[in-house]
Image (tube, rainbow, N blue to C red):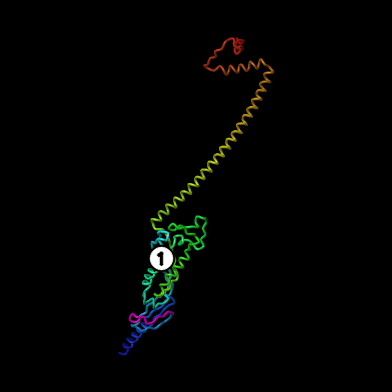
Amino acid sequence: MKAPIIVVLIVAALMIGRGALYVTNEAEQVIVTQFGKPVGGVSSPGLHVKLPFVQKVTRFDKRILKWDGDPNQIPTKDKRFIWVDTTARWRIVDPLVFYRTVATERGAQSRLDDIIDSVVRDAVSGRLLVELVRGSDYVAEDESQERFEVEGVEVPVEDLVGREEILADLLEKARASTPEYGIELLDVQIKRINYVEQVRTRVYERMINERKKVAAEYRSEGEGEKAEVLGKMGRELKEISSKAYRKTLEIRGAADAQAAAIYADAYNQDKDFYAFLRTLESYKKSIQKNGRMVISTDSDYYRYLKKAR
């Protein structure tokens, strides 16, 4: 009988010991509750003791946590409707306050939704779109980018702030509301800014038209250069042809002069024979097949034919 009793006692002691001991690691912090009410907390890692079956351990993360909001459609100060996608980093610095106010990380995420979304909406609606996308060290490339018009009033670029100042102000305002929940807000960043679909379509159309305008300017410049090159080529071609034609005339003139000199020399050697030869050549060219020549018998052109009879 004693052996079973001892076994029961050992089992009961193990169960009580298991319920009384708990372990925390470096990434955890613990709130101990008794009948739902917090009675203590532990933030150091190691083995700890609690009342078995009466006290309960609720664990919270000590590491940096991430918050991602839903993209919101917000109008800027210059009436540009944009989608703003925001993210933040936070951590639990007072687990007791955290447990009493939001209880869980999901509850904290929901509360951050309200805080950060509200602050982001106020920040975006109170600033120009150019301020949300430009850096603090932005320098205008030309004078047309040094002034911006808002509701009919020109605003010089030196009066604008940059994205870094807006985010710093946004973080300061959002951080002011988180300590009451045991939360420290470490950072708030805008992940993405984009036009709403309707505006984005118009922006794309304007970009396409601008690119077409630039392309037309390039084509016009190209056509002008093409016409200039073709004109220059035409002038050079005419100049080359003119020089070649002049050279041809010079060669032909020299050849004709040389031929005339040869003919003259031959004529002077035997005038009768030369006259006879030239007349025969003339007959050959004048009298063709199936052709007739009608001349007077008294013509000097006919004298060699009369002698031949």
The image position of residue 267, as x and y in percent, is: 67, 18
103 to 202, vertically: above or below: below
Q: Which quadrant of the rendered structure holds the C terminus?
A: top right
Report if residue 7 lies within the magenta region: no
Instruction: Pick whichever, 308 or 119, lies toward us.
Output: 119
The residue that label 1 is drawn on is 122
Q: Residue furthest left?
A: 1
Instruction: Pick whichever, 265 or 101, lies toward us.
Output: 101
**Mark 1, secondary structure of its residue:** helix
Q: Residue at x 49, y 57 (%)?
A: 147
20 to 269, vertically: above or below: below
Question: Count of labels shown?
Answer: 1
Q: Is residue 162 shown left or right of residue 16?
A: right
- Magenta segment main secondary structure: strand
Q: Residue furthest bottom?
A: 2
Q: Residue at x 52, y 59 (%)?
A: 139
Which picture quadrant has residue 299? Answer: top right
The image position of residue 138, as x and y in percent, is: 51, 61
Q: Which quadrant of the rendered structure holds the N terminus?
A: bottom left
| Label 1: how many Cα within 10 Å (few below 14, some 14–19, many 20+) | some
The image position of residue 109, as x and y in percent, is: 38, 70
Give the residue type that dot 1 points to: Asp
- What are the residue bounds of the magenta stretch? 33-44
Which picture quadrant has residue 201? Answer: bottom left
Q: Residue furthest front?
A: 153
Q: Is residue 221 shown left or right of residue 19?
A: right
The image position of residue 283, as x and y in percent, is: 58, 16
244 to 305, vertically: above or below: below
Report if residue 41 lies within the magenta region: yes
